[in-house]
Structures are given as C-alpha cells and as structure tokens.
Image (cartoon, coloured by chain):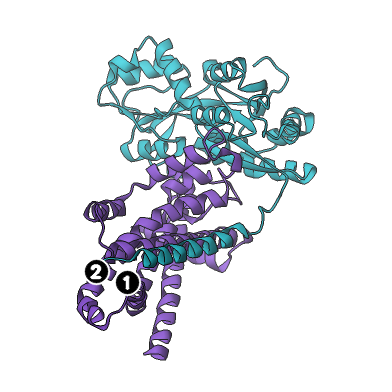
Amino acid sequence: MFEILSSFEIALGLITHADAELWGIVWLSIELSVVAAVIGGAMGLPLGAIVGIARFPGRRALIVVLNAMLGLPSVVVGLVFYLLLSRAGPLGEWGLLFTPKAIVIAQAALVVPIVAALTRQVIEDAWAEYAEQMRSLGVGTARAVRTLLWDTRFTLFTVGLAGFGRAASEVGAVMVVGGNIDGVTRVMTTAIALETSKGDLPLALGLGVILIGIVLAVNAAAYGIREWSARRHG
Amino acid sequence: MEMTARAFWRLSLAWVAAATAASTILATRPAEAADRFITVASTTSTEQSGLFKYLLPIFEKKSGIAVHVVAQGTGQALDTGKRGDADVLFVHNRVAEVKFVADGYGVKRFPVMYNDFVIVGPKDDPAHAKGNDVLEGLKKIAAAKAAFCSRADKSGTHAAELRYWKAAGIDIAKDKGPWYRETGSGMGPTLNTASGMNAYALTDRATWLNFKNRGDLVILVEGDKRLFNQYGVMLVNPARHPHVKKEAGQQFIDWLVSPEGQQAIAGYKINGEQLFFPNAGTDN
C-alpha cells in the first residue's frame, strides 16, 4: 500500500520536475497512438459500415471473425509484423523494424478490428431503425451509409476513442516491433515495463499514473469537442 | 437492400482515400532525429545496469553516430543479428558468439569486458548455499529442493546457469521438480519473481546492483572463478546483409576496444562500485 501511495508522489515529482527525456516519451506516446488511431479508424470505419449494411455471402462469418478479432492477442500481432518487417522478411527492404513507424503499423493493426466490429454493430442497429423509412424515400445505399454515419457520429467518436485507448495502452506488440530503444521507440508502456524489470516498482507505477493521466486528458478533450459540436449542430 | 456496385466502389474509393490521407500523415513525420545511427542488439544486463546510458553519450559526442540499443537476451540478440536487424551485437555467451562468427553471420568477435555472476537467495538461506563455490551452492539448493528461479530464455545468463548445473553433476532437465521455476523472461522480471517467492536465482552482478525490488534477497554465492562473465562485440556480416552499416558499426567496435572506450567502461560505477571490467585484447 505504501508503494502505491509513494508512486503517486513520484508521479507528481516527475510531472513538476519533468525533464526533456520524460516529455519526449510522453509526446511520442501521444503522437504514435493518435496517428495509429486515425489510420486504424480510417480503415476500420468504412469496413464496419459496409459489413453493417451490405448483404453478401459470407457476411455472418465475417461478423464472427470481426468480433473475435476484438480479442486479437497483441503479442501475436507484434510477432507477425516483426517477421514481416524484419530484414529477413518480405518487407525487410523498407528497413522499418525498430522504428516509430513499425510501432504505428502494429498499433493500427490492433485498432482496425476494434473500430470495425463496433462500427458494424452501431451502423447495423441504426440501419434496422431507419431502413424502412429510407427505402420508402428511395434513398440509395451510398447515401444511406453517409446518413447513418452522420447520425451515429457521436457514438462512432467514442468508438474512435476506444481505438486510441487500445493503441496507447499497447505494450506487447510495441515492445517487439519497436525494440524499446531509448529516445527513439521508447513509449510510456515500454518505459513502464523497463522500470518494472529494474525492480523500481514505485517509479514504474509513477509512470503508469502519468499514462493514465494522458489518456484521461485526451478523452476529456475529445468529450469537450463533442459537447461543443453537439451544441453547435444540435 | 442490395448494395449497388457503384455505391460499393464509391465507398471503397472513399476508404482508400482516407487511408492514403492517414498514411501521408505518417510518411511526413520528420525523419528520425539522427540520420547517422547504428542499431546494436545487446543484452538486458548492459541496458538495465545503466551502462549504455552512461557510455553511449560519450561515443555519440565524439563520433556523431547515434547508437540505438535494442536490449534482448543474448539468444534473441544473436537471432536479431542473423536476421540482419542489427548492425552490431554486444552480448555475453562466448560459445554461441564464436559459433555465430564461424557460421558466417558475424565478421569478427572482440572481447570487451567482463563482470561476474552471483547467486542471490533469501537472507536466511534455507539450503545453506552460502559460500564461494558455485557448484557446491547449486548442489545444496537442489538437495534441499529450495525454490530456484531460472531465466529459461536462452540468454547468456541462462546458458551459464545450465553449464553450472551440468558441471555440478546435476541433470537439471531430468531432476527439476516444482522447486525449479522457469520464468522464461529477462533478468529483471526473473529477479522480481524470485523476490516475490523468496527463491534463489543466478544473476549478473551489474543487474543485481541496479535492481531495487530485492525484498529479502541477498548475495549468497560469489567470488568463484567460474562465475566469470565475458562480454563480446561483433559486426554483423555485411556479406550476408548488405544494408549493415559497416563503417559506423566498426567505428563503434573500434572505440569500445580502444584505450578511451575501455577507460569509459571502467569509469561506470554505482555507489562507488565498478560494474564492468574492461579486458579488450585479451584471449577471452
């Protein structure tokens, strides 16, 4: 118990006396997670919307697969991308292994199924509600998708935040493809893992408190934007 | 409602556009800070003991070459080198290193420095392992079936541990019982486990000195000549992996074994205690 309390003290000390190194790690974590969430969202959102509305053979199987991917083991994703990006792998020429880009790729791969599966459910529910009305108005599918995406935008915004959360809290895949290189690919989660390895548990937890703070801040900002836009657009 | 082909293509197009836009954000990310850098696959002990944090800035300032260290167990680091994902290896398992070079994966192995292994265990030492004979200590731990945490991760420390069991006449693969706990993880996590279970463990001294969550563990066996732990450095063979940065990599190796680099290694201390002892140019 004493250690948990002292870690809050350490977190406070880290923040008030933050050195360039800590800010570098904090900033890198935010930057990579946001980019990964945007890329993963850009891919997962349309995928989920299409599966939610379109009817095609194998759709049910695809939904089961998408939902199952919510539990995609991140260390396996890390390993797959490690083998793909390694110099001995098919994409080795790009030389991306142990770079921040490799981290974003692995994080995005983890974000896509979350965004796709949740979007699919959201859009499918909204479609069930409005399908008849839209049909009677003779609205085409593309237009219907656009309308539904717009109508459910606040829910989908939360879906995007879930994607960001997964990217920001990721450690297994990030450690494998990033290599936890000091000043290059060391992010909050891998820094926490390193301090845990060194047996400095209060410092590790102190960093954890800061990470939770970052995620809270990002979500608070997102909530604020949402409220503001809800008031503006009704 | 059937989705029309046209609607489908339009959506797909929007999707590709969005993904491209996002990828562009990624691509325009400023290039990595230093264009001149090498990747070094090394061990958890050199990273977690704080040696690199002390050593690398000295080299980077002198050479202008940034050193990116990926800390892994020696077994994994050698594999990283084999795959061509590092330019230089800085590891501690002489037998495996010599084989690495003989197999054509590395150019030449240079001895750099040594430290030593110690056996840590609970203060009250239930197996009475305390002493300066590693083989006697292990025999007593096995006889008492006292809890022992093994790295079990093909690291240099794990390889050394297996050599000691064998030398002590114990076939650990056969004789291990529930008391022999294979953590399958790095030195730090294994020490965390040992500390939580009040178990014995073999560790390098540098990691131990820098380890804070000791609980009731203390050093029990030390000072045996056989506990010697040699580190070597090698350039990954550019003949096998043409992208290896051979000039910059060799420059780092040359500096490590130069009088200046050796002096820097000797200068790294925790609480006044020297962690690594330079011995470049010797036959180790």
Q: From the image, state the color of chain B.
A: cyan
Q: Chain of mark 2?
A: B
- Chain identifier, colour purple: A
Query: Which chain's residue wears label 1?
Result: A
Residue at 45% x, 72% y is A217
Residue B152 found in image quarter? top left
Q: Is residue B269 above or below residue B1?
A: above
Residue A153 image offset from top left, x and y in percent: 36, 76
Whole-angstrom CA distance, mark 1 to mark 2, is: 8 Å
**Image quarter of the N terminus of chain B:** bottom left
Label 1 neighbourhood size at 10 Å, few (<14), some (14-19), many (20+)? many
Numbered tag placed on residue A141 in the rendering: 1
Residue B233 seen in the current view: yes
How far from the left and from the top, in percent, is residue B257? 73, 27
Residue found 27% across the figure and 53% down from its top: A62
Measuring 52% from the left and 28% from the top, which residue is drawn there? Answer: B79
Q: Cβ–Cβ below 8 Å for labels 1 and 2?
A: yes
Which residue is found at the position 34% from the left and 59% from the top? A114
The local secondary structure at tag 1 comes to helix
Q: Position of residue B28 (x, y in %)?
A: 63, 60
Q: Within 10 angstroms of label 2, few (less than 14), some, or many (20 or more) residues?
A: few
Q: Nearer the viewer, residue B136 or A85?
A: A85
| Residue A160 appears left or right of A51 | right
Amino acid tagged 2: Met
Q: Toward which corner of the image does residue B146 lie, by quadrant?
A: top left
Label 2 SS: loop
Q: Which residue has dot 2 on it?
A: B1
Please state which amino acid type lies under the numbered disc 1: Thr
The x, y position of residue B88, in whole percent, is 64, 32
- Answer yes or no: are tags 1 and 2 on the same subunit: no
Could you say which is closer to the camera, residue A213 or residue B99? B99
Q: On residue B192, which mark appears?
A: none
